[in-house]
Image (spheres, rainbow, N blue to C red):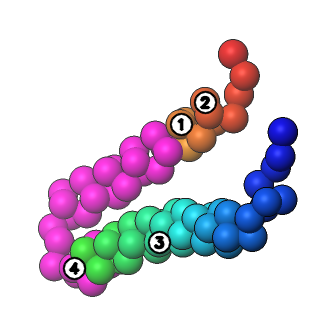
């Protein structure tokens, strides 16, 4: 059995490119999410009523809580 790259250096280049693209997509997802929240919430914050501010904070908190729970569940063995 041969491992990747022993026979063909192009396989190594493709594997490295795939890892870089996957990592860039992961980082881009978090950057895009942060930019979306920043542009849509913090720039409009003074225009929001008190009820809308509470709803926005609640929605962001629930989202972060769900993400934390999913990360915790993914890191535990069952």
Residue drawn 34% across and 70% down? 37
Q: State which tag comes first along the sequence, 2 or 4.
A: 4
> Residue 26 vs residue 77: left or right?
left
The quadrant the C terminus occupies is: top right
Q: Which residue is mark 3?
A: 28
Residue drawn 84% across and 59% down? 6
Residue range highlighted in magenta? 41-67
Residue 7 position, x and y percent, is: 79, 60
- Crowdedness near tag 1: few (<14), some (14–19) or many (≥20) residues, C-alpha within 10 Å: few
Q: Which residue is mark 1?
A: 70
Q: Residue 53 magenta-drawn?
A: yes
> Would you say the magenta stretch is mainly helix, strand or loop?
helix
Mark 4 falls on what kind of element?
Answer: loop
Residue 63 vs residue 73, the one in the foreground: 73
Pointers 4 and 3 in contact (CB under 8 A)?
A: no
Give the Cα distance between marks 1 and 2. 5 Å
Q: Nearer the viewer, mark 1 or mark 4?
A: 1
Q: Which residue is mark 4?
A: 44
Q: Report the disc number at residue 73.
A: 2
Residue 65 position, x and y percent, is: 49, 43
Give the Cα distance between marks 3 and 1. 20 Å
């Amino acid at each position: 059995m041969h491992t990747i790259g022993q026979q063909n250096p192009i396989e190594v280049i493709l594997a490295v490119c795939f890892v870089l693209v996957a990592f860039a997509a992961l980082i881009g997802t978090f950057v895009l999410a942060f930019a979306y929240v920043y542009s849509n919430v913090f720039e409009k914050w003074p225009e929001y009523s008190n009820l809308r501010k509470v709803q926005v904070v609640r929605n962001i908190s629930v989202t972060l809580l769900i993400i934390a729970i999913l990360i915790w569940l993914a890191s535990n063995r069952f």
